[in-house]
Amino acid sequence: MATTQDTLHAAADGRKLNDPAMLKRRYAAEWRFKAYGLGALGIALFFLVVLFYSIISQGWTAFLQTNIKLDVALNEADFQDADGQITEQSIRVADYTKMARDALQSTLGLESPTRPEKRDLRGLLSRGVDVQIRNKIESDRSVIGQTVPVWVLANGEVDALIKGSIDRNTPEERRQLNNKQLAWIDKLIAEGRLEKQFNTGLFTYGASSQPETAGLAVALIGSFFMMLIVALVAVPIGVAAAAYLEEFAPKNTFTDIIEVNINNLAAVPSIVFGLLGLAVFINFMGLPRSASLVGGLVLSLMTLPTVIIATRAAIRAVPPSIREAALGVGASKMQTLFHHVLPLALPGILTGTIIGLVQALGETAPLLMIGLVAFVVDYPTTPLDPATALPVQIYMWASSAERGFVERTMGATIVLLMFLFVMNAAAVYLRRKFERKW
Amino acid sequence: MEQIATSATAETAPMSGVANGEAPKVTARDVCVFYGAKQALFDVNLDVPRNSVTALIGPSGCGKSTFLRCLNRMNDTIPICRVTGKIELDEQDIYDRDLDVVELRARVGMVFQKPNPFPKSIFDNIAYGPRIHGLVRDKTHLEEIVETSLEKAGLWKEVKDRVHEPGTGLSGGQQQRLCIARAIATTPDVILMDEPCSALDPIATAKVEELIHELRQNYTIVIVTHSMQQARRVSQKTAFFHIGYLVEVGDTEQIFENPQDKRTQDYIMGRFG
Amino acid sequence: MSTSMILLGLLIAAALAYIVGIVRCRASTGGDVAKLHSRTGYYGSYLAIWTVLPALFLTIIWAAAEQPVIRHLVETSLPAHAAGVENDALMSLTLGRINSVAEGLPKLSQSEFKTIENARLGFTPMLEAQRLLQEKGVILGAEPEPYIISAAYDEVIYRHTSSWLITGLAALAALAGFVYGFTQIRPRLRARNTVERVVLAALIGASTVAILTTVGIVFSVLFETIHFFQSVPTFDFFFGTVWDPRFTSAGREGGASGQFGLLPLLWGTLFISFVALAVAVPIGLYSAIYMSEYAGPKFRGFAKPLLEILAGIPTIVYGLFALITFGPFLRDTGAMVGLDIAASSVLTAGIVMGIMIIPFVSSLSDDIISAVPQSLREGSYGLGATKSETIRKVVLPAALPGIVGAVLLAASRAIGETMIVVLAAGIAANLTLNPFESVTTITVKIVSQLTGDLEFNSPQTLVAFALGLTLFVITLALNVYALYIVRKYREQYE
C-alpha cells in the first residue's frame, strides 16, 4: 500500500501540487479564455451597431424631401383646347412644366431669361412637378384662372445640396449645380420658399427613374398581398400538418419521412424555392409573372416548415392531462384537438406565425426568380397585377447608380426594419402575455 | 512544504488507525447555506477525523449533500448559493479569500451520485487531473500514475487491456470505480462521496464499499448515503441531518446502538425518511 | 376566371347544404335532438361535405388538366413547318403568339370578329386583322400567319367549351352528392365519425404538402436540368473551367455555343463560404461559450436578444451593407496599406456573410453546449479544474459532434445564401486564390441567368436549373448529414 502511495506522491515532486507559478499560469489561461469569449460577443454586437449606424445615418434623410413653394399662375388660356373648351383631355395635356418654370422665373424676378438660364431654372425643379400641379387641378378645377401657391418637389441635385451631400466649395465645373443656381437656391431659402418637408412621396409613389419621385407604394401593396396570402395558405396548412403529426400520426416510415422532410425543407436555400415557383406556378400552371399571387405562394411554401415546427412545439407544450380530461368525458380525439388543444396552443401558434411572416417579409431571392423585379408605376389592385415587394424594391434601388437612390435605398431599408421590428415586438409581447407554466 | 506534510500523514496514517486525540482533518463551525432567500443549512458544527470514514445520513432534502458540497466549495458553481460560517481543512479556512478553489478541489476530491466519466478513454479520464495540475513529468510517469490509481481503485485487473477504450463503455460499477480512481489520481487528502452507490447494483455496491474500506487507510473520506446499512458498514463516525440541522453526531456504533435524539432514533428505526 | 366562380358557387352550396342538413336531421326525429347520434352541426357538415367534395375534386382535376390538354390540341393542329417539332424554342415562340392572339379575340366586337374570321379564310388582308388586334392591345411583331389566327380561334373555342363543360359537370356532381347525402341522414347515421374522418384526411393532406414541395422542387428542377443537358454535355458542365454563357437572342441557331463550366462558380461559392465560416465559427462559438458558461442571467437576458436581432435582419440588408458601406471601407483600408482590394472582393462578401451566420452558429452551439450534462462539469470541477480547463477539455470534446453538425448547417446556409453575394460579390467567374479579387457564386449566376428577358428554353436560362439542382444536392447532403449528427448527439445525452 505504501509503495503505491509513494508512486502517486512522487508524481508531485519536482512540480508541486500547489506551485504558485503553475497556478498563476492556469489562471492567466482562464482569464484569456474568458476574454476571448467576451471579445467574440463584443465583436458580434459591434457589428450590429455598425450595421444599424450605417443604415440609419445614410437613410434617415430619405424621410425628408426638399420642396419649393411656387405661385403658379393658372391662366385659362393654357388649359383650352383648339376649340377654346376646357375638357378633361385638355387639362391632361396642358404644359405644366412651362407653368412651373414660369412661376419659378417670376418668383426669382427674372424678366427674360436666356436659354441657358431657362435650362438652369428647369434644373431646380423635379421632372415630376407637372404631375403634382395637374393633380392639384384635377382635384379642384375651380382654381383655374387663379394664381395658387403649390409646394412642388425640387430636383434631386437641389435635395442633395440641401442635405449636404453636394459640397458648395467644389469648383463650379465639377459641381452639379452652377453658381447661378446656388444663388437662386439661397434666395428661395431666404424667402422661405425652399425647405425640407416630410417625404410623403416615399410612401405614395410607385417606380420612377428619378429618385425624388420614386416611392415604395407598389412594393408596400405587393408585400401586403404576399403576407395576406402567406397567412391564408401557410398558416392553415401548417397548423393542420402540425396537428396531424403531433396528435394522430402513427410512428411509421411515412411519418418519419415527413419529419425528416420538414426539417430539411427548412434548410433548403430560398433561391431554390424561386426555381420551384418559376417552373411550377409560372411555366406549368400558367400564372402571370410579376404577380404577388405567385410571390405569396412561393413564400407560403418557404414559410410552411417554420409554421409547422413552431405549432408542433406549441401543441407539445399542452400537457397530456388536458387531453386525458377531455377524452375522459367522452370527447372524440378530433373534438379534443379543436376544443382544447388548439385553443391552448394558440399563443404559441400565433408567435410562430408571426416569426414565419417576418421571415417571408424579408425574403428577396426567390422573388427575383418569378419576375417581381419589375418597374411598376401603377398601384396593383389585385394579387394578379404586376407588383414588387419591399426587399425587392430595396434590391432594385441598390442597383441604380444615382446618389439619390442610395439615400432612398437606405430609407426603404429603415421602413423594412421598422416593420420587422414591430412584428417581432408583437411576437415577444404575445409570448410574454400568454406564457403559461403548466 | 504542504506536500511533505501530506506525505508524512500518509505514511504514518496506517499505523495510527482511527484518529484518536489527533487534530481533526476538517472542522466546520456555524455553517449556514442559503439558496437565494431560502436557508438550507443551519449552524452546522462538525469535526471530520483524519483517515477515517465519516457518514452523513438523513432523509432526502435534509441538507447532507449540501453540506458535503461545501467541503470542496462545489456550491460555488451555483450562482444563487451563499455560504456563511467557517470550514477549515488542516486548520486553513477554505473560504478564505487567499485560498484558491482550484487548489482546494485538488486536495479534496469528489465522487458523485451518478458515475460521470468523461466521454474519453479510460486512460484520459484518469490522466485528466494530473495533467491539468501539472503533476506529470513525462509519458512513463503518467502511465505509472494511471496504473497506480486504477490499481488502488481495484479496477486495473479488469481494464488493463483496454485503457484506451472509452470510459463510458464500462459497466455502472466499473464507471463509479473509474471516477474514484480519477479522484485518487490528483493525490487528494480528502475524498467526498455523494451517494456513490445509489446508481449501482448490490454486487457493484459491495465492491465499492470494499474499496472505501481500503482507501480509509490513506485518505479521509466523507460519504453521504441513503442506506443506513451502508453507513454502518463503512463508517467510523456518523452524522445525522434533519431539515437543515445537524441533529446528532457520534461514533457509528453509538449512533446506531444508542441514539440520543428522538429524531435520530425514529429515523434509524425506519419510522420516517 | 370561371374556376373561381365555380368555387364561389360551391361555397354558397356548402352553406345551404349545411342548413338543410340541420333542418333534415331535426325533422328526422321530430325535433328531439337527443335521439340523434351526433350533434346537429355534424349532420349539416355531413351534407355540406357530400355536396362540395366530389364537385371540388372534379373542378381541381379539370383545372389542372385543362391547360396541357388545350395546348396539346393546338399543337397537333399546327402545320408541320410551324410546329417545329424538333425545335423547342420555335415552338414556344409560336405558342406565345397564338396565346396573345387568343387573349385578344374575346375583346373584339361581333363585326370585328367577323373580319378576323374572313382574314383567316383569306377574304380580307391579314394586315387588317393585325390592325384590329393591335387596337385591342395585342402587339404582333409581324403579320399573323393564317394558321396562327386559326389556332387562336380554336383555342378560344376550346376554352369556352371547357369552361361550360366544367361548370355543368360541377353542378351535376354537387347535386348528386347533395341528393345522396340527404337520403343518408337518419338518426342513427354516425355523422360525426364521417365528418371527423374527412377532417383527418384533410390534416393528412396538409402534412403531405411538405413532401409535395420537396417532390416539386426535385422534379421541376430535374426536368429542366435534363432539358439543359440535351444541349450541353454533362461533362462540360460539371468539369468545365470556363463560364461564358454567351447570350444569344431567342430561337436563333447556335444558342448553345456558350461555355457552361461549373467549376469557377463552385470554387467561388466555396471560397466565400470558407471566409464566412472562418469569421462566423470562432466568433459564434466563443460567444456561445461565454453566454452559456460564463454570463450571468442578467447579461444573458440582455445579449441574447441582441444576437437574435442580428439573426432577424433580412439578408438583403446585409447585402446592402456590404455593397454600400463595407466594400468601399475595405477597399479604402486596403489602399491605405498598399493592398489592391476589389470593392466586391471575396473578403467583402465572405466577412459580411460571416456576420450574418454568427447568430446562427452561436445559437446552435449554445443549445448543444447546454445539452452537455452538468455532471461532467461537476466531475471536472471536483478534480480541481478551472472553468476554462473544464470547457476546453471536457465540455467542448463532449459537444464536438454537435458542434460539427452546427458548423455543417452553417456551411449549408452560406453556400445557399443569395442576396449578399448578388449585391456584394462579383459577376466575373474567376478561378483565383486571392481573397482580394472578386469571384462569383452559383446563386449569383442563377439570379443573373433568370432575370432579364430571355427565352425560356435556351440553354442560357436552363443552366440556372442545372445550377439550382447542384446547389440543392449540395445543401441537401450537408443538411441531412448535419441533422443526423445533431440528432444522434442529442439522443446520446437524453
Image: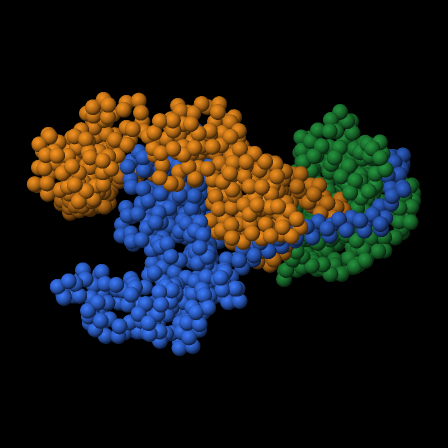
Chain colours: A blue, B green, C orange
Q: Residue at x 67, y 30 (%)?
A: B169
| B148 to the left or right of A304 | right
From where the camera sits, is residue C488 visible?
no
From where the camera sits, is residue A277 visible?
yes
Work out whether residue C436 or residue C306 is closer to the camera in this orientation and state it. Answer: C436
> In the rendering, at what x and y percent does residue A51 appear?
54, 55
Q: C1 above or below A98?
A: above
Q: Quadrant of the N terminus of chain A?
A: top right
Q: C167 above or below C256?
A: below
Work out whether residue C38 or residue C442 is closer to the camera in this orientation and state it. Answer: C442
Q: Quadrant of residue C346?
A: top right
Q: B109 above or below A183?
A: above
Q: Residue at x 47, y 49 (%)?
A: C316
| C355 to the left or right of C114 | right
Work out whether residue C468 or residue C406 is closer to the camera in this orientation and state it. Answer: C468
Q: Residue furthest bottom?
A: A191
> In the rendering, at what x and y percent does residue C334 appear?
63, 49
Q: Residue at x 47, y 32 (%)?
A: C244
Q: How many tags in the picture?
A: 0
